[in-house]
Image: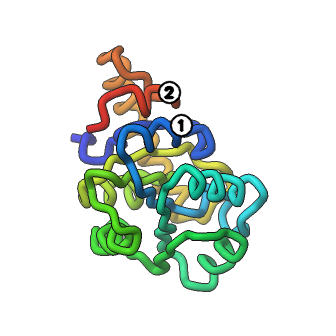
Amino acid sequence: MFAKFYPSRYVESAYLIPYEKLYAKGYRGIIFDIDNTLVPHGAPADERSAALFLRLENIGFSCCLLSNNGQERVELFKKDITEVHSIHKAGKPKIRNYKRAMELMGTDTSNTFFVGDQLFTDVWGAKRAGLFTILAAPMNPKEEIQIVLKRRLEYFVIREYRKKRLKTAAKKFDDAETIADGDMD
């Protein structure tokens, strides 16, 4: 019932993903959500996020920010980030802009993955677009009311996801190493 919302993997932070291993596995593009995935909601890029994008550029990844926020918000985040594409007012979970992001990066579903913090917009849209998905735990518990309400529903889906993953013991849902070492379905 909930499986259509399950991420491919779950991590405590987008900063704990073994990007080098994913690159070695053939991934070349990353689509990121911004708010509560990379920085707290509404915050500009910080030192850690700027360092992450520099690291990703040095590895060889092409990146695209995919946000349902307006242009002003996206530009605020990316003003100190080099070499990153962006799409604002993305309309997630519609798949159109996930595909557009891949076009901008010159990648496709076989070599692109998505990182975001919300199941019902980020992950569901990316799954429908055919992408490998990584759900990152939200960075900040303070959120807008509509997101707080979605988080309550997400709780039940994540609980079922964890039960499923525990039953299959071969994959740990919270171990960043298994993201790259496990199968990449």
Q: Identify the residue shown where x is 60% and y is 62%.
A: 35
User: Eyeballing the image, is 11 above or below 31?
Assistant: above
Name the secondary structure under disc 1. Answer: loop
48 sits left or right of 127 in the view = right
- Would residue 3 appear left or right of 72 to someone viewing this image? left
Q: Which of 93 and 26 is in front in this view?
A: 26
Residue occupying the point 50% across, 60% down: 32
Residues at discs 1 and 2 in contact (Cβ within 8 Å): yes
Q: Position of residue 87 (x, y in %)?
A: 46, 77
Estimate the x, y position of residue 77 in percent, counting from the top left. Answer: 66, 72
Which picture quadrant has residue 30? Answer: bottom left
Residue matched to label 1:
18
Going from N to C along the chain, the mark reached first, 1 or 2, is 1
The furthest residue to the left: 1
- Residue beneath the point at 74% across and 52% down: 48
Task: Name the spot of residue 27 as percent of width and height, x first.
Answer: 38, 48
What residue sits right under mark 2 in the picture? 177
**Colouring style:** rainbow
What residue is rendered at 47% in x and 36% in y? 21
Q: In which quarter of the image is the C terminus?
A: top left
Numbered circle sitting on residue 125: none
Q: Residues within 10 Å of mark 2 (few under 14, many from 20)?
A: some
Spatial CA span between label 1 and label 2: 7 Å
Q: Say what amino acid the circle numbered 1 marks.
A: Pro
Q: Is residue 161 left or right of residue 173?
A: left
Task: Identify the secondary structure beneath mark 2.
Answer: helix
- Please give the count of numbered marks on the rendered protein: 2
Where residue 131 appears, x then y in whole percent?
Answer: 30, 53
Check disc 2 and give the amino acid type.
Glu
